[in-house]
Amino acid sequence: MRSPAYVKLNNFTSIKITVLKPLLDNTNPDHILELHKETVEVSKKEVVKAKYQIEKTTETEDKQVFISLKNKEVQIKEIVKEEELEDYPVTTKVGNTTIIPIIREEEVVIKKIILVKEIHITEDTTTEIKSIPVTSRIENVKLTKTE
């Protein structure tokens, strides 16, 4: 005769043990008596220990951001020179002004180099701080444990 017994090991595993009681075996001429026999069955089941609820939100925030903007203004002046030169002039830079010589050659008994005019290009760079609107996102997560 069998008598099953269940033993709980932990939250996930249980063992089924079946114990056989001694039986007299009349068919066996040696009359061997089986005194004790156990069988083991192991099974698992999932157990929920806790439940959580996760809530994620995204917010936008408008704010002023200061950036640096550069503005370059160029002034071009034409200066008449009409000077006679010995050699060909080259483009030069004085401070923030670039000087580009314009020449012409005149034919005479001898060739002369005449500086007709110069073009002066002056660069002025200004920096100004401006406030511009920018939208940034902020994410928040709320974690709530439910039973």
Image (cartoon, helix red, strand yellow):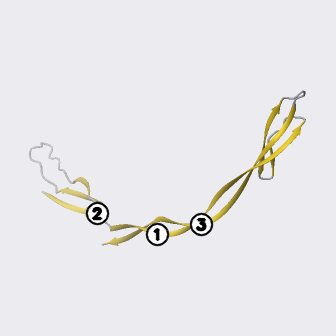
Q: Position of residue 18 (x, y in %)?
A: 20, 56
- Among the two numbered marks 2 and 3 on one chain, the one whose residue lies closer to the N terminus: 2
Circle 3 packing at 10 Å, graded few (<14), some (14-19), many (20+), is: few
Quarter of the picture containing the C terminus is: bottom left
Circle 2 packing at 10 Å, graded few (<14), some (14-19), many (20+), is: few
| 24 horizontally vs 124: left or right | left
Q: Is residue 106 above or below residue 53?
A: above
Q: Position of residue 145 (x, y in %)?
A: 35, 71
> Going 15% across and 43% down the picture, which residue do you hit?
30
* Residue highlighted by disc 3: 130
Mark 1 or 3, closer to the camera: 3
Under mark 3, the amino acid is Lys
Under mark 1, the amino acid is Glu
| 59 horizontally vs 95: left or right | left
| 139 horizontally vs 11: left or right | right
* Residue highlighted by disc 2: 47
> Going 19% across and 50% down the picture, which residue do you hit?
34
> Going 25% across and 55% down the picture, which residue do you hit?
43
* Residue highlighted by disc 1: 61
Secondary structure category for the residue under label 3: strand
- Among the two numbered marks 2 and 1 on one chain, the one whose residue lies closer to the N terminus: 2
Q: Quadrant of residue 116?
A: top right
Under mark 2, the amino acid is Val
Secondary structure category for the residue under label 2: loop
- Among the two numbered marks 1 and 3 on one chain, the one whose residue lies closer to the N terminus: 1
Of 60 and 89, nearer the camera is 89
Of 105 and 16, nearer the camera is 105
Q: Which mark is residue 117?
A: none
